[in-house]
Image: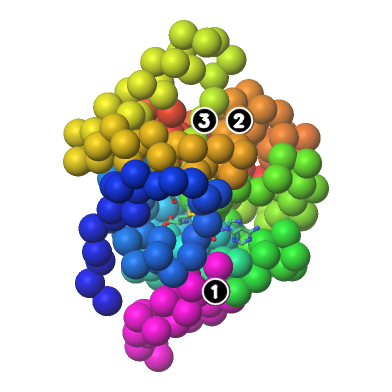
Amino acid sequence: MPASKDSLYASPLGEIAAFSFDENVVKVFPDMIRRSVPGYGTMISAIGLLAGRYARENSRCYDLGCSLGAAALAMRANIAVRNCKIVAVDCSEAMIEQCRRDIELAPAEVDIEWRCADIRDIEIRDASVVVLNFTLQFIPLEDRGRFIAGLYDGLLPGGVLILSEKLAFDDKRQQDLQTEMHHLFKKAQGYSELEISQKRTALENVLIPETFSEHRARLEAAGFSSVEVWFQYFNFASMIALK
Ligand SMILES: C[S@@+](CC[C@H](N)C(=O)[O-])C[C@H]1O[C@@H](n2cnc3c(N)ncnc32)[C@H](O)[C@@H]1O
Ligand SMILES: O=C(O)C(=O)C[C@]1(C(=O)O)C=C[C@@H](O)C=C1
């Protein structure tokens, strides 16, 4: 399906519903995420390279909150080991249906299993690579610790977690500046003030960002021995956590 332009928030909306990954978002998602997340394409390419480096024979690579499967596809293009399976999970039926409909898999290639499930409910096991590309931010705060601890247990020794998130900042000047720069990025991508402000309202209490220190503390508490930011563009960052 050709990607359509995102104009979901272009006209004034009387009441702004909480943001959800429904059929309307699915139709415009590739355009929406590319024009909303600074550095998105760079992060997807790097996830492919990291999967090529870390994927192990007889293991699984997980794309959790896969949306339309961009990270899963980047991993598939880079994995060269045998008997390594990609498991791509999303709780939005509209997203998973689109993946199943659109993504052709030649039998010889690395297998991708598309699963419609809540990532808090699945068993993660034998994982050499786990990707959370802008997904943890949508999980209720109180569930994040237990979820990351389970994910850590499912990683093989030497495995990697790639965690990309919208960040918050303790310092108010940084918070204001990074938010302003993100909005300027969106404007430069063609979004109007109205689109930016209505989307912001829709994401309130739905996307809950945390600081890098909070992410690092949770990852270390779960057992990760090394956590670093490898990419940041304004308030969007991607971390590598090593088991
Ligand atoms: C910003 S999108 C992720 C983008 C995608 N990873 C990419 O790289 O293109 C967040 C996704 O997480 C999914 N999601 C949010 N909470 C979830 C949960 N508890 N279980 C499974 N998927 C979830 C949403 O349905 C949505 O598709
Ligand atoms: O913070 C914003 O304004 C966003 O649009 C960010 C964000 C995200 O980080 O997931 C929110 C929802 C859409 O899926 C695409 C991008």
* Left or right of 209 on screen, residue 174: left
Q: Going by the image, does 148 lie left or right of 165? A: right
Applied colour scheme: rainbow
Q: CA distance from mark 3 to mark 1?
A: 27 Å
The reply to whether the residue tagged 1 has its Cβ within 8 angstroms of ligand 1 is no
Q: Residue type at mark 1?
A: Glu
State whether residue 3 is above or below residue 134. below
Front residue of 34 and 203 = 203
Residue 209 seen: yes
Residue 95 is covered by the magenta coloring: yes
What residue is disc 2 on?
210
Residue 53 or residue 221, whichever sits in front: 221
Q: Residue furthest front?
A: 14
For the magenta stretch, what is the residue range?
92-115
* Amino acid identity at mark 2: Glu
| Mark 3 neighbour class, 10 Å CA radius: few under 14, some 14 to 19, many 20 or more | many
Q: Which residue is mark 1?
A: 93
